[in-house]
Structures are given as C-alpha cells and as structure tokens.
C-alpha cells in the first residue's frame, strides 16, 4: 500500500497533465462545442458509454489477450533462442544479417493478405502477424546483446571452462539481457499495435473489433471509451514489464 | 621443479610486438611477481599463461605440456571483474565449484563449501549480496575466495589490488599471503603488478619486464625472510636497496622511452 502511494506520488506530474488534457477536452466538447459533436462526444457521453460497455470491453480484453499473450511469448522464446545461437555463431550471423536487414523493416501488416489466404483460421493469421512483428526487435536485440557482450565476461567464463548450455544460460543470456529487454520492450509496443490492426480486419471479438464495430455505427462515445480502456490497460502492462525489467537488471545500474 | 615455462615467446596484437622472444621459468610453489611499466606486456604474459591468448611463436608450457586453452588448473583473478555481476557472491563461487566438482555433488554441500571460503576471506555476511552491492575490496576478497575454493594449483593474478585504496590494498595483500602460506600444498602464483613495494613484499622472485623490449629485463630473488611484515621491511636495509634498485631500472626504461631532456621543453598538452 505504501508502495502504491509512493508510486502515485512520483507520477504526480503525469497525473496533473492527464487531468489538464481531460479538462481541455471537456471544455472543447460538452461546454463550448468547439469540436464536431459526433466525432468528439464529451465525457457526458463517453462516461456512460464506458460504464455500459464494461462487460463487453472485459470480454474483448480477454479475447485480445488470447491473441497477444501466445504470440508475444512465442516471439520472445523464438527470438531469444535464435538470437543467442546466431549471435554466438559468427559464420551464421555474417550470412544471415543482410537477409534480416532486408526483411525486418517490412511492415508486418503487408503479410496480412498472405496470412489470411494461407493459414486456416483468423486466430492463426493474427497470431502470425503479431508474432512476426514482435519477433524482429527481440531477435535483433538478442543478437546485438550477444555480439556486444563484454570480453571480460567471456574471459572469465572461459577461465572457468564454462561451455555449452551452462555457458549460454549462466553467462551469455544474463550478460545480453539488457539488450534483450530493450528489444522485448519495443516488441511489446509493436504487439499492441498489430493486435489492434489484426482485430480490425475480420475479427469477431477483441478490443480492436469493439472499436472498429462502433466506429462503423458512428458510436464515437463507445469508440473513445474503448480507446481509453485500452490505453489504460497498455499502461498497466508496460508498468508490469518495466517492473520485471528493473528486477532482472538490478545488477546493471550498480556496476 | 618447473611448473610454468615460457620459451622464446613472441606475441603481438597486430599493432606492434608486445613480447619478442621472452624466456621465463617459474618453479612449483613459487610466488613470482611480474613487474613492469604499462605496455611492457605483463598482462599479455598472464593471458598467455591463462590460455586466453596463444603466442605467435615460442612455447608456453604447464608441467611440461603446451597450454592450448584456459583451464581450471589455473585460477585467474582480474583487476576488477572476476565476478559475474548478475550472480551473488555465493553463486559466483558455487558456479566455479560446480565446474570442478561436477554435477554429482549435492548443492547444499557445494553451497557450504562456498560459504566456508567466503567466511575465510572475511565476507561472512555477504552470501546473498551482488558484486554491485560490495566495495571494490570486498569484490576482490570474493574473487580470492573463489580462486582458493576451486583449488587450482596455479594462481594467475592480474593487478588484483591495482584499483584499491592503500589500506584495503595492504589488508588484501596480507590476506593473500596468509592463504598462500597456510595451504598444505603451496600454490604457484604469478602476480602481475606495477607497484615495486607490493612485488617485494609478496614475492619470492621479482621479474621485471622491459618497457619496450618485450623481454625480461631483470630477475631478482627476494631473500627476505617470511612471514614478512611491512614494519620490519621498512626497517630493513635490504628492502630499501632492492626497492631503489628496481625503481631505478623502471625509471631507466621510462626515461628512455620518453626521451629525457626533451619533454620538459614541450608545451603542456591541452593548454
């Protein structure tokens, strides 16, 4: 409880800025009607819309998580696993890097038609799109982490005759973990973007679907309610991610 | 008996020669200090003995056999990075112990050995601390605990106390000497330093590398009796003579490489 109070205190500036934005938005909508009332309903409409949609939003969230969690975890394990091997084995890295540089900047959304055509279900194609999009930052981060690994750690490990699996898990992985976390954080943001995009095409549930559906019916109160719900959730997830990151990398800021 | 032999060793990093035909023999149980100005190749010499680098020419032998790579028969302590910062002091030692004892040993047993050695170096309360939470002196204590726990017959120490303040440094010198003297089977120690007094205090023999020759410039046996205390050494004329002699030799090289007489006249850099 004390930790929560401290956390809120340290983000006082953020809360003030959010409050100011909300006030400005309310002034521009409900009070002075500066903005288009259909596209930008005020809180008098967003508030009730949010309350009445909560059950649907919760359901959507669970459905979205069903897409996000497996694809992100798959990207994480594949990316870190491949990255460790490719980073350690120079001939492989040398030959693969140009190919990676060619493929990684392609927006994963371009694969959507192929994914939909080739993979049997919507769930599989969305998973694939999110997986591909979040794989690259993790893979590249891991490879860089392994390549830039400090020689002194390697000397030390070699002097202890560490090899194989033990070398990989006890030395290489932790030594590379700052860069891996860096990539994984970027990948998480990508995963959210791609999740929403994927759900806007042909999904029957999920947060992206909820927003798209209400936009189609010009229910912008619900659209904005959905957006607010979603960003709140993303903030919480990112907070959790950063907490895990801080915990795992506690040794980096002291040395 | 010869433990370590460097026979006509050549080494360069591609940017100029570091060692050019160096010869050195170190006996079993001997404590040898390698002294030299920076750039004299003393750390390179240690890396060759550790098997972390290979000579371009010449032979590096351990018990008469060529050294082809690093091994647990040689424990290495570096200046300030012998511990992995993501492992606690205890984990750092159990990781090393696991390499010697194999997986068969019970983890609790391994842990208790690690704690025993941490206690021995005066780190009793720090089993669960990470290196980043310890002072430089405590980190080096843990590194020494690790190297003694592993029990390698050869210890290679690369300026292990170079980054410490004088008092911590003196304490750790005493600790190392104590552990080395107390052991039933004396280990062969190669101790790299640029501190003349440290070399004399610790070693049976001081080997001075030339600043730019890439070879041994001078070797002197330190015949002062053990245990040596700083107090008695400072009163001993032999200590001062030896110290002055070595400092003169070191300065000779430094002055030669600077080009005596010219440097005073040069405008100061950065002004």
Image (cartoon, coloured by chain):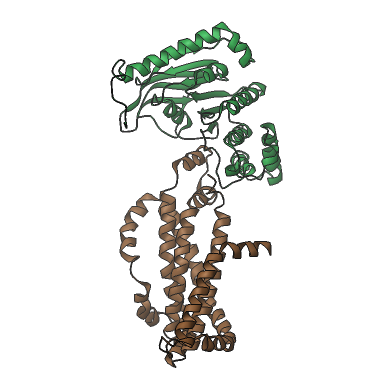
Q: In the rendered view, tell whether residue B154 sits above or below residue B251.
A: below
Q: Quarter holding the N terminus of chain A? A: bottom right
| Chain identifier, green in the render | B
> Where A70 sits versus B74, above or below?
below
In percent of the image, x 50 and y 54: which residue is there? A177
Seen from the viewer's position, the closer of residues A105 and B189 is A105
Query: Where, by quadrant of the figure, is residue A40 drawn?
Result: bottom left
Residue shown at 64%/15% (left/top)? B227
Q: Examine the rendering and report whether any part of residue B83 can be seen.
A: yes
- Percent of width and height locating residue B229: 63, 16
Q: Is residue A88 visible?
A: no
As drawn, which residue projects farthest toward the front? A32
Residue B58, quarter of picture: top left
Is residue B58 toward the left or the right of residue B117 in the image?
A: left
Q: Nearer the viewer, residue A20 or A95?
A: A20
A15 and B222: which is toward the camera? A15
Colour of chain A as rendered:
brown
Residue A212, position as x, y percentages in the image: 44, 86
Instruction: Residue A158: give x, y in percent of width and height.
Output: 49, 40
Q: Give the vertical position of A118 relative to B269 (above or below).
A: below
């Amino acid at each position: 409880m004390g930790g929560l109070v401290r956390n809120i205190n340290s983000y006082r500036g953020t809360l003030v800025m959010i409050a100011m934005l909300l006030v400005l938005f309310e002034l521009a909508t409900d009070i002075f009607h500066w903005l288009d009332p259909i596209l930008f309903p005020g809180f008098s409409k967003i508030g009730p819309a949010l309350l009445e949609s909560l059950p649907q939003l919760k359901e959507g969230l669970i459905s979205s998580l069903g897409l996000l969690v497996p694809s992100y975890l798959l990207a994480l394990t594949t990316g870190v696993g491949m990255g460790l091997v490719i980073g350690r084995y120079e001939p492989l890295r040398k030959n693969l890097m140009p190919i990676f540089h060619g493929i990684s900047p392609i927006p994963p959304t371009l694969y959507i038609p192929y994914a939909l055509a080739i993979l049997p279900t919507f769930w599989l194609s969305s998973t694939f799109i999110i997986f591909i999009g979040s794989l690259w930052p993790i893979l590249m981060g891991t490879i860089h982490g392994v390549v830039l690994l400090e020689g002194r750690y390697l000397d030390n490990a070699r002097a202890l005759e560490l090899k194989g699996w033990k070398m990989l898990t006890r030395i290489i992985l932790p030594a590379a973990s700052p860069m891996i976390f860096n990539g994984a954080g970027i990948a998480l943001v990508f995963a959210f973007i791609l999740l929403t995009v994927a759900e806007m095409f042909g999904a029957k549930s999920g947060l992206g679907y909820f927003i798209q559906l209400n936009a189609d019916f010009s229910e912008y109160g619900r659209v904005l309610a959905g957006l607010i719900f979603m960003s709140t959730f993303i903030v919480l997830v990112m907070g959790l991610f950063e907490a895990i990151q801080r915990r795992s990398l506690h040794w980096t800021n002291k040395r | 008996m010869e433990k370590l032999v460097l026979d006509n060793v050549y080494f360069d990093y591609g940017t100029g020669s570091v060692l050019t035909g160096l010869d050195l023999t170190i006996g079993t149980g001997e404590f040898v200090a390698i002294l030299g100005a920076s750039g004299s190749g003393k750390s390179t010499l240690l890396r060759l003995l550790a098997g972390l680098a290979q000579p371009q020419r010449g032979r590096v032998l351990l018990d008469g056999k060529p050294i082809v790579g690093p091994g647990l028969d040689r424990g290495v302590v570096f200046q300030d990075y012998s511990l992995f910062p993501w492992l606690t002091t205890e984990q750092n030692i159990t990781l090393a112990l696991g390499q010697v004892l194999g997986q068969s040993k019970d983890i609790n047993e391994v842990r208790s050995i690690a704690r025993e050695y941490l206690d021995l170096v005066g780190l009793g309360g720090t089993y669960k601390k990470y290196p980043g939470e310890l002072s430089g002196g405590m980190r080096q204590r843990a590194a020494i605990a690790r190297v003694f726990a592993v029990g390698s017959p050869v210890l290679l120490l690369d300026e292990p106390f170079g980054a410490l303040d004088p008092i911590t440094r003196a304490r750790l010198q005493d600790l190392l000497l104590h552990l080395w003297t107390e052991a039933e089977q004396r280990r062969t120690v190669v101790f790299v330093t640029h501190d003349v007094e440290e070399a004399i205090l610790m070693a049976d023999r001081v080997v001075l590398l030339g600043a730019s020759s890439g070879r041994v410039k001078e070797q002197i046996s330190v015949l002062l009796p053990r245990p040596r205390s700083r107090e008695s050494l400072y009163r001993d004329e032999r200590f001062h003579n030896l110290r002055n002699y070595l400092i003169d030799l070191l300065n000779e090289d430094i002055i030669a490489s600077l080009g005596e007489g010219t440097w005073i006249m040069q405008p100061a850099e950065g002004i």
